[in-house]
Image (cartoon, rainbow, N blue to C red):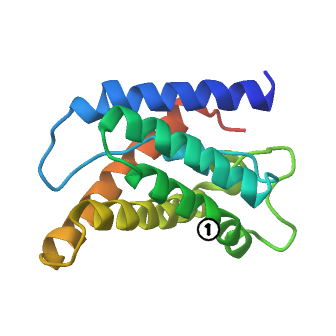
Amino acid sequence: MSILLRNIIRFVLLLLIQVFVLNEILLHQLVSPYLYMLFILALPFNLPRPVLMLMGLLMGLSLDMFMNTPGMHAAACVFIAYLRPFIINILSPQGGFETTQKTPSMTSMGVSQFLIYAAILVLLHHTVFFSLEVFGTGNLLYLIMKIVFSSLASLFLIVLYELLFFSRK
């Protein structure tokens, strides 16, 4: 299957899972699991930054339309899409990641590197998104707890997705 087709399917699948499954699950006031940003995390290594940001904008605006959150998901997605190449460059070994794999995954990056990569971008995404949602620092402890607990739930879902859909070597 081509990389383009795989990413189109991933876009639609993650959007549908987020809108029709995860948004309907109420775990706790402090936990909002988001899986859709995995679309941005799993885009090919060699995509130029403007294309990454455009893909982030498309995913964010698509989710904003379903959730009635004008621009909040789009802002968070464009932010992590912009920072993603920096994070990959910082985490990549000197020779770069395995060239047989064209997308970031536990297989191509290694489990620990992928978890660090995902954790950084998920934390950044949630910081932007929940800061816009709360729109202030009136209750800073609540904001920090929501970012941390939602990031943990999202990372759990990302790892679960990786284990289900990517085979080991």
Residue drawn where x is 30% and y is 68% of the image: 131
Q: Is 66 placed left or right of 46 in the picture? A: left
The x and y percentages for residue 103 are: 73, 46
Which quarter of the rendering shows the N terminus? top right
Q: Is 157 placed left or right of 52 in the picture? A: left
Q: Mark 1 points at which residue?
A: 83
Q: Nearer the viewer, residue 36 or 149?
A: 36
Label 1: state its secondary structure: helix
Residue drawn where x is 32% and y is 57% of the image: 152
Q: Which of 40 and 161 is in front in this view?
A: 40
Residue 147: image quadrant is: bottom left
- Up the image or down, 166 lies above or below 54; here it is above
Residue 82: image quadrant is: bottom right
Q: Is 49 placed left or right of 35 in the picture? A: right
Q: Can residue 155 be seen in this view?
A: no
Residue drawn where x is 61% and y is 68% of the image: 83
Q: Is residue 97 visible?
A: yes
Count of marks placed on residues: 1
Q: Which amino acid type corresponds to the residue marked 1 in the rendered image?
A: Leu
The x and y percentages for residue 155 are: 41, 52
Which quarter of the rendering shows the C terminus? top right
The x and y percentages for residue 75 are: 47, 58
Q: Is 88 placed left or right of 160 in the picture? A: right
Crowdedness near tag 1: few (<14), some (14–19) or many (≥20) residues, C-alpha within 10 Å: some
- Up the image or down, 102 lies above or below 6; here it is below
- Up the image or down, 131 lies above or below 163; here it is below
Most distant residue in the top direction: 1
Residue 135: image quadrant is: bottom left
